[in-house]
Every structure is written in C-alpha cells, then in structure tokens.
Image (cartoon, rainbow, N blue to C red):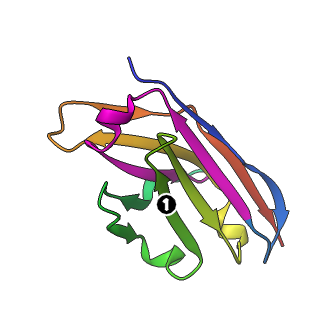
Amino acid sequence: QVHLSESGGGSVQAGGSLRLSCGSSVSISEFSLYVAGWYRRAPGKERELVATITSGGSTTYTDSVKGRFTISRDHGKNSVYLQMNSLKPEDTAIYYCNLLRVDRSANYWGQGTRVTVSS
C-alpha cells in the first residue's frame, strides 16, 4: 500500500504564498509510472482537480489557478509540490495529493492539508 503525506498548508492573507509538499512511499523506480496531481475541496463544494504533472513534466492546470500555481515533482525524492502564489480567498480548501498509475491500475490519495486564505 502506497502512503502519501502532505504538508505545507496553513493560513495566509490574500496575495500571499504557500508551498505544498507531498511525499510518497512509492519506490523510485515506480514513481515515474504515476501521474501526480493536486485536488482541492472547498467548503460546501465538490472536489476539483487543481493541477497534474506527468513523469515527463507535462502539466495541466484548472483555469482559476493558471499563472498563480505551479506543480512540480522530484523523482529523486518521490515527491510532488504545489507552489501557490497570489492566493485568493476562493483558494481556501483542503488540498489533496494524488498519484494515478498511468495504466490506471492504482490510485492513491493523501490525507489532505488545509489552506485558508483571508481577505
């Protein structure tokens, strides 16, 4: 069973920055077999995909975070990161790390880290 552990959440004022980290127990050799992603669930809303990154470094972002958030991954550390700049109150949510195996045979989630942005 793969374990994901997020960190870096917290409370900031609008315009501030946070960097979320997600460490995984996936082996170094297998980490490249996963697409990594960050999702979030805002209060009263459904979970939404924020960003993804393939092992080759291709990224996707939901429109509301483009130009403000950057997803990255470190294969040597089996980790995924989300740099969040120019934070807005509407970014307030619990953020979840996800690893989806490219053949969709495995899908893992972290426990979530809370981000609160005040105006």
At x 38%, y 49%, the residue is: 36
- Give the residue at the far bottom of this rendering: 67
Is 31 left, or right, of 71 in this rendering?
left
Is 34 left, or right, of 92 in this rendering?
left
- Where does the C terminus fall, quadrant-wise? bottom right
Q: Residue 107 versus residue 32: which sits nearer the camera?
A: 32
Is 117 left, or right, of 21 in this rendering?
right
Magenta span covers which residues?
18-42
The three-letter code of the residue at mark 1 reads: Ser
The residue wearing badge 1 is 72
Residue 59, horizontal then vertical, whole percent: 36, 68
At x 31%, y 54%, the residue is: 55
At x 83%, y 62%, the residue is: 12
Residue 60, horizontal then vertical, whole percent: 36, 69
Residue 3 in view here: yes
- Tell me where residue 85 sits by quadrant: bottom right
Q: Residue 11 versus residue 44: which sits nearer the camera?
A: 11
Image vertical order of residue 91 relative to residue 20, above or below: below
20 falls in the magenta region = yes
- Tell me where residue 30 sits by quadrant: top left
64 falls in the magenta region = no
Mark 1 neighbour class, 10 Å CA radius: few under 14, some 14 to 19, many 20 or more: many
Is 19 left, or right, of 64 in this rendering?
right
Q: Residue 23 versus residue 112: which sits nearer the camera?
A: 23
Residue 43 in view here: no
Please, what is the dominant secondary structure of the magenta stretch?
strand
Residue 97, horizontal then vertical, whole percent: 49, 43
At x 61%, y 47%, the residue is: 21
Mark 1 residue element: strand
